[in-house]
Amino acid sequence: MQKLKLLILASAMAAGSAFAHGNEYLDTVAAPHGGQLRMAGIYHLELVMPAQKAAAEQTVTIYITDHAGKPVAVDGARATMLLPGVDAPVVFKPAGDNKLQAQLKYQPSQGLETKVDFNDGKQQVSATFTPFAKAKADGGHGTVHH
């Protein structure tokens, strides 16, 4: 009976910690750089896409942290993003510390959905973002940057 109680307690704790780091939870957290946070394997990815009124070339940044929010060095890492209306994947390159950047032209919209693949040189992980959707963390104002 004691073993059963311990097993139930361990299962509940594991479920709680898994939820604490899921995308549903991350949608309620203010991202450090004002972007959208997503789970990607052992990492948290934060996608920052500035919002402009019309399609224009912008610097887009992806920040990489561990689950505790500690920055992860991205030397030698690479990220690609699939963006609707763009024929080839957008390639992001290291831009110091824990960030990767790319210049791209896009039209911000509430329905924009994009997939980011991050490769740290050992493994590849992926995350799907809706960078202009209304976020819960900021009272429904979204991750729009002015």
Image (spheres, grey):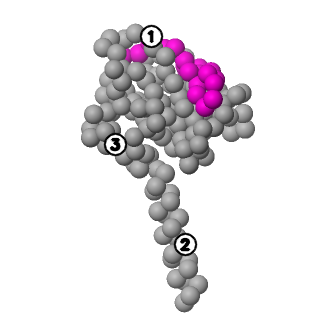
Alpha carbons under labels 3 and 2: distance apart: 29 Å
Q: Residue at x 57, y 35 (%)?
A: 64
> Main structural element of the magenta stretch: helix, strand or loop?
strand
Q: Residue 132 appears at what percent x and percent y?
A: 35, 29
Image quarter where the N terminus lies is bottom right
Q: Residue at x 43, y 45 (%)?
A: 26
Q: Is residue 12 above or below residue 24?
A: below
Q: Which residues are magenta?
A: 89-108
Q: Circles 2 and 1: CB distance less than 8 Å?
A: no
Q: Which residue is mark 3?
A: 137
Alpha carbons under labels 1 and 3: distance apart: 27 Å
Q: Which residue is mark 2?
A: 10
Specify the quadrant of the image occupied by residue 111. top left
Q: Residue at x 27, y 34 (%)?
A: 141
Q: Residue at x 53, y 29 (%)?
A: 62
Q: Earlier in the sequence, mark 3 or mark 2?
A: 2
**Disc marking residue 57:** 1
